[in-house]
Image (cartoon, grey):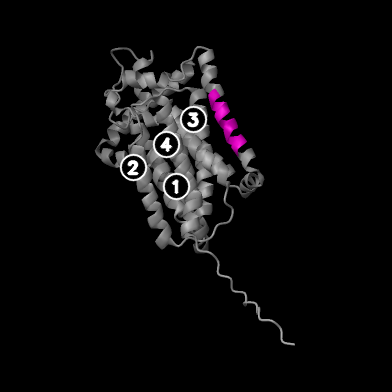
Amino acid sequence: MKLFDLLLKSEIYQILYVQDVFSRYEDFLATITRAFDPKILFLTVIPLVAGLSTRLYSRLLLSVLLTEYFNTLLKWILAEDRPFWWVRETKEFTTLNRPKIYQNEYTCEPSPGNPSGHLMTSATYLYVIFSVFEEAGLQYGKAAVVALRVCYYTILLFISISRMYFGCHFLHQCIFGIVLGVALTKLTMSLTFEKHLTKLTRKRRMAYFCLICLMLLTVYWGQKLIGVDPQWSVKMAFKWCDDPFFLDPSTTLVFSIIRLTGSSVAFAIVGPVLKSPPMNWKRSIPLVLMMMVGKFMAISYTPRYYGVILYYLYTFLIHLLFTYGYMRLVPALAGVRPVDTRAPRNNRPKMD
């Protein structure tokens, strides 16, 4: 434990160095951390992909759901601090030499720090999207593929810098998030995995997602039984955040589970899509944009002052209904059906 504290102490100095070097680029880093917020990605990137290809949407959605579930599970199990409160709580520093980490509204996230959710989910989103680009770029040779991969990891590097700059994550939490995100996406993007899910009945798929939720509940209540508060990170964030109004309840682990479960139920009902008709983009893109606006409006009217049960139930239903709509409604209304080119049968009666 002492060695781990020394590691975190050295990474605090890395954060201070990043904050000093990149202070003039704060607006750019703020844009990066906003753009790759898992919640924002879920509300923007996934719907836009639904307007382009139902199959790609299905693959991306499955990868994101499993990645975010796994991220939530690991956060509760590992229960690691975030830099902005660890530096105030640790005994590695004294009152005289304790450094002050810069904070703003992007700093105060109330979930445990490891692995980084921003890096883990961003690695998944970008991996799926860049895989499509790579398939298209193969015709231009290996140079195009190498350039795309350099671009992929450069984006992840900038996200890591932004998370360290705002004091949200230690360096090892960013690296661990990237490694896990890439590994999980390779698994969920495999055709073998997709075919396995396709062969499952709807009840069996639902049972798998219920099993994941049961694992999360087991960890949650297991911590309570051994005397550990599963919401300890929320209390730490409130304690050491410079401004409590920076805290957003939608960034808590419980809210994330409700959001993911709503979309998971919709995915379990429809199932993975291995084949889908091409989209008429003149119809699919406007339809998806209207649905995105509708979802943002529905979320803005979430009943926050009528109890936790109603708050979570409403969140669950919103994500279930819109995910189902992206998987069924969009291809039904905007999909291009193949034209039957077979010669018409001659149904006239034969002459005697």
Amino acid type for the residue under numbered disc 2: Met
Q: Is residue 167 above or below residue 183?
A: above
Q: In which quadrant of the rendered view does residue 26 lie? A: top left
Q: Which residues are magenta?
A: 206-217
As rendered, which of 169 and 2 lies closer to the eye? 169
Cα–Cα gap, marks 1 and 4: 16 Å
Answer whether residue 321 is magenta in the image. no
Cα–Cα gap, marks 4 and 3: 12 Å
Q: Which residue is mark 2?
A: 297
Q: Residues within 10 Å of mark 3 (few under 14, many from 20)?
A: many
What's the mark number on residue 118? 4
Q: Which numbered disc flags the more N-terminal residue, 3 or 2? A: 3
Q: Is residue 283 above or below residue 257?
A: below
Amino acid type for the residue under numbered disc 4: His
Indicate the position of residue 170 as horizontal and vertical percent values. 41, 28
Q: Which residue is mark 1?
A: 46
At a point 50% along the width and 47% down the height, the residue shown is 60
At a point 48% along the width and 52% down the height, the residue shown is 329
Cα–Cα gap, marks 3 and 2: 26 Å
Cα–Cα gap, marks 1 and 3: 20 Å
At a point 45% along the width and 23% down the height, the residue shown is 80
Q: Is residue 212 visible?
A: yes
Indicate the position of residue 88 as horizontal and vertical percent values. 34, 17
Judging from the image, what secondary structure is the residue with disc 1 in? helix
Q: Which residue is mark 3?
A: 72
Q: Which numbered disc flags the more N-terminal residue, 2 or 1? A: 1
In the picture provided, is 73 more to the left or to the right than 17?
A: right
- Magenta segment, prevailing SS (helix, strand or loop): helix
